[in-house]
Amino acid sequence: MTSFRLGLLLVALAALAVASCHGDGGCRRGEACDCFDGNECYLGCGDGDGCDQSCHNVNTCGAVCGNGCTHTCHDTTTCTTDCGNDCQIDCHTNNTCGAICGARCDYACSNVTTCGVRVGPGSIVTCTQVNNCTVECHGDCQVQCSGVGSCNVTCLDGTLPITCGGDVLACGSC
Amino acid sequence: MLAPRWILGAALLAGMLAIPGVAHAQYRAHGYSQYRQQPAYTLELEPHLVAGLGNPPGPGSGQGGGAGVRGSIVVSRDGFIPTANDSLAIGFGIDALHYRGAYGADYFGTCVARTPGPAGTLVCTEVDTPGGPRNYLFVPLVLQWNFWLTDRWSVLVEPGLDLYFTADHGGVAPSLDIGGRFQLNNVVSLIFRLGWPTATVGISFLL
């Protein structure tokens, strides 16, 4: 009986070792990953979802993340974002901003020469002080263009965007 | 960091492969009968959970977990020590692990895939991050040295090699584990081993 208890203890310790495996360090869910200064910054998300990514003062920046991520990008030449659903992205004071994101994407683009964004249903895109704001929407979306030279909204279901007033264009309903 | 492990592993493996002939001869010369606590089996089949408790060989880092299976074929019921109740087996198997990575200063990577976006943009859609998460496949080949302590308990030492495969990388690494076995009956045992690159806990079937 004693040896059996000892066996159980050893198995439990081994199971604990298995269960306790985890990574350590920075780019994790809810923790800020800040990349700046240099030529290129490409950020992944170790947990897949929920990363808080930031990139600034570099030539080229790219962030890739799953769902529920945030990405702030400024003072770059080119900044792109690939994100899943429920992402919040702020791209400002750059030459070019590009993004592909999923449903319920909240994308803000300001003080940028070219802004090209493809978003999923339920998304909101805001372009402010942008020369060329081009948005492609899968499903319903709203695009607000303020101080924009060319505001191009394409509804990928083939319908035409509708004007909602207040510089807002929409695919689907306003 | 790797060099000492290579040297240790190679030395252990070379030593253990060289000794059996001598040990076996001594065992026979003394005429001991030490099989009384060894279960009669030729193949040990072992499904198990696997943990990588330290950085794996190759480009991965951090800790990982997964599952695998091991088979060990008994090659001698006499081990290296004439006065001990020990035996030898050759173990082989396959283990699949996911390493979550160790980030810190290494979470900036390189863009390895891009997709055209609106307005002529080119969006990075895949980042290969050093120290990031990786999947590994290990193929261990080990010498299993068993010590049959009681009718229920045995311990084992396993020096050997691990072939490893991960995305666009592969190689061979030395491995060393120590472990134990608790026999529930003549066929089924609980078995665990601790070491590098992997540790395991599982069920052993002595067939």
Image (tube, coloured by chain):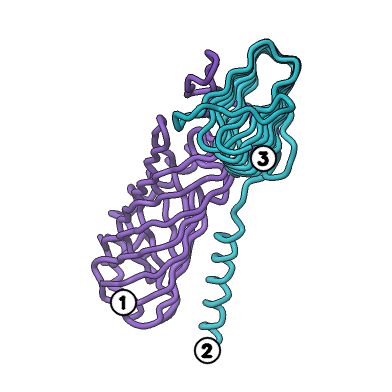
Tag 1 subunit: B
Name the one closer to the observer, B11 or A52. A52
In the rendered view of the protein, which quadrant contains the C terminus of chain A?
top right
Q: Is residue B64 above or below residue B3?
A: below
Separation of marks 3 and 1 at Cα, in angstroms? 53 Å
* Crowding near the residue tagged with mark 1, few <14, some 14–19, many ≥20 C-alpha atoms within 10 Å: some
Quarter of image, res A33: top right
> Mark 2 or mark 3, which has the lower sequence index?
2
Instruction: Report the residue at 31% width, 76% height from top.
Output: B39
Q: Say which chain is purple.
A: B
Image coordinates for residue A138, horizontal then vertical, percent: 51, 34
Q: Amino acid at mark 3?
A: Cys
Residue type marked 2: Met
Q: Which mark is residue A51?
A: 3
Spatial distance from mark 2 to mark 3, Cα to Cα? 49 Å
Query: What residue is shown at x 37% (from left), y 41% (from top)?
Result: B163
Q: Which residue is mark 1?
A: B39
* Residue contact at pointers 3 and 1, CB within 8 angstroms: no
Query: Mark 3 vs mark 1: same chain?
Result: no
Q: Chain of mark 2?
A: A
Check disc 2 and report its element: helix, strand or loop. Answer: loop
From the top left corner, tell me how far across and down residue B15 is, in percent: 39, 47
Q: Disc 2 designates what residue?
A: A1
Q: Nearer the viewer, residue B22 or B11?
A: B11
| Labels 2, 1: one chain | no
Residue A159 position, x and y percent, is 48, 30
